[in-house]
Image: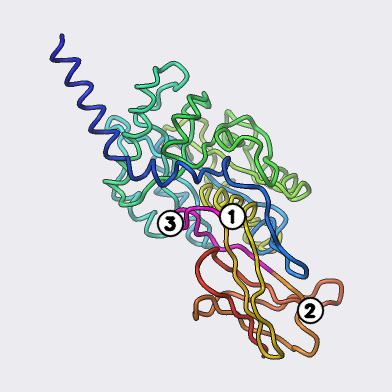
């Protein structure tokens, strides 16, 4: 018995040791710990959602159901939308590592749904730690990415303090639209789709999206099975694809992005400090920074300001590289709108 106990302790130490670097990088950089004291001087504005859209939309997929990779991800690729695959890593759940690697290489998020899909609120602290760190290790090893977010199995919340050692946010499924800053980032709400959920049709997707639009909130869709792949609460692939058509037809209203990207954007937006450092008749220099770990929080924020008098247009660079920018008119006032990654170098707005 003593030998068995020692082996278990040794195994746990080995597992925990392998994620020490991940824990250290996340410990002080969780969304819930980021300061909510953005400093943005007039006349600059930082968008609530990327592109100054009114709502964020995330498609999330649980349980490794086969048609997620066979149907959903290719359909999203058609429109350049990125989703989140919350993956169960135990081999008995048959994770398609090659398919997940391909999805990750195309910009989709591969995140954790624990190792075995156990109800976390029934497990000991040691067992929860094993489920969480083991999943992170498996994804890192087999996909080549570090998972940053977690989906609670069966929507049963486990120890958030344990989860926060490895992940920056976690998704539950209480069936609500989230506000622009979630109250609890370790239990972010989602809307269950398919036969057992409240979102079954394209009309349902649109209804929830419009609710998010009206509240400037975030709608997170939770999808398991698609068509006849054997997954829980199957969703019709036709209704799924029609929902994508709707969002593709409304690019100025809805920002469709992975769960992790939206989480990071929120944290950066709430912690941003913008400082104008120089200005003359042909260029403006500024910095965009935050108090977060830049190796994790590196999603571009959208910024805008009125064009100075006499400027017809402008181009924008960050650290010497041209970034996305666009001239927009708001209440007859011309603005330059651009994307900038916090702490990624000086930004220059140059007159055209």
From the image, state whether disc 2 or disc 3 is nearer to you: 3
Is residue 299 magenta-colored?
yes
Residue name at image x 62 percent, y 79 percent: 285
Q: Which residue is mark 2?
A: 334
Question: Could you tell which of marks 3 and 1 lies nearer the N-terminus?
Answer: 1
Helix, strand or loop at mark 3 = loop
Helix, strand or loop at mark 2 = strand
> How many residues crowd mark 2 within 10 Å: few (<14), some (14–19), many (20+)?
some
Residue name at image x 53 percent, y 47 percent: 259
Q: How is the image coloured?
A: rainbow
Q: Which numbered tag is attached to residue 268? A: 1
Whole-number angstrom distance, CA of label 1 to CA of label 2:
26 Å
Query: Are the residues tagged 1 and 2 within 8 Å (C-beta)?
Result: no
Residue range in magenta is 291-303
Q: Which residue is mark 3?
A: 295
Residue name at image x 60 percent, y 66 percent: 288
Question: Could you tell which of marks 2 and 3 lies nearer the N-terminus?
Answer: 3
Question: Could you tell which of marks 1 and 2 lies nearer the N-terminus?
Answer: 1
Q: Residue furthest right?
A: 331
Count up the numbered dots: 3
> How many residues crowd mark 3 within 10 Å: few (<14), some (14–19), many (20+)?
few
Tell me residue 62's x, y (percent).
46, 37
């Amino acid at each position: 018995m003593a030998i068995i106990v020692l082996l278990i302790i040794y195994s746990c130490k080995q597992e925990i040791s392998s994620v020490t670097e991940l824990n250290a990088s996340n410990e002080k950089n969780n969304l819930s710990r980021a300061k909510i004291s953005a400093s943005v001087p007039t006349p600059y504005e930082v968008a609530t959602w990327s592109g100054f859209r009114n709502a964020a939309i995330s498609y999330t997929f649980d349980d490794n159901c086969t048609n997620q990779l066979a149907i959903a991800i290719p359909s999203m690729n058609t429109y350049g939308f990125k989703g989140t695959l919350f993956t169960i890593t135990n081999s008995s759940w048959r994770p398609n590592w090659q398919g997940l690697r391909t999805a990750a290489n195309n910009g989709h998020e591969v995140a954790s749904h624990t190792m075995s899909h156990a109800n976390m609120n029934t497990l000991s602290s040691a067992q929860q730690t094993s489920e969480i760190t083991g999943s992170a290790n498996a994804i890192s090893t087999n996909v080549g990415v570090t998972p940053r977010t977690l989906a609670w199995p069966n929507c049963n919340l486990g120890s958030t303090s344990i989860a926060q050692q490895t992940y920056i946010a976690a998704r539950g499924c209480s069936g609500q639209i989230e506000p622009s800053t979630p109250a609890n980032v370790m239990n972010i709400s989602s809307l269950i789709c398919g036969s057992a959920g409240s979102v079954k049709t394209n009309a349902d997707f649109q209804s929830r999206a419009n609710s998010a639009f009206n509240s400037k909130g975030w709608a997170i869709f939770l999808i398991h099975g698609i068509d006849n792949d054997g997954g829980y609460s199957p969703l019709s692939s036709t209704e799924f694809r029609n929902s994508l058509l709707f969002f593709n037809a409304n690019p100025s209203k809805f920002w469709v992005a992975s769960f992790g990207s939206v989480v990071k954007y929120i944290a950066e937006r709430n912690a941003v400090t913008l400082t104008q450092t120089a200005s003359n008749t042909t260029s403006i220099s500024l910095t965009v920074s935050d108090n977060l770990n830049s190796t994790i929080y590196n999603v571009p924020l959208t910024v805008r300001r009125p064009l100075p008098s006499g400027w017809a247009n402008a181009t924008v660079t960050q650290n010497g590289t041209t970034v996305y920018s666009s001239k927009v008119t708001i209440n007859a006032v011309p603005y330059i709108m651009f994307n900038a990654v916090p702490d990624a170098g000086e930004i220059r707005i140059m007159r055209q």
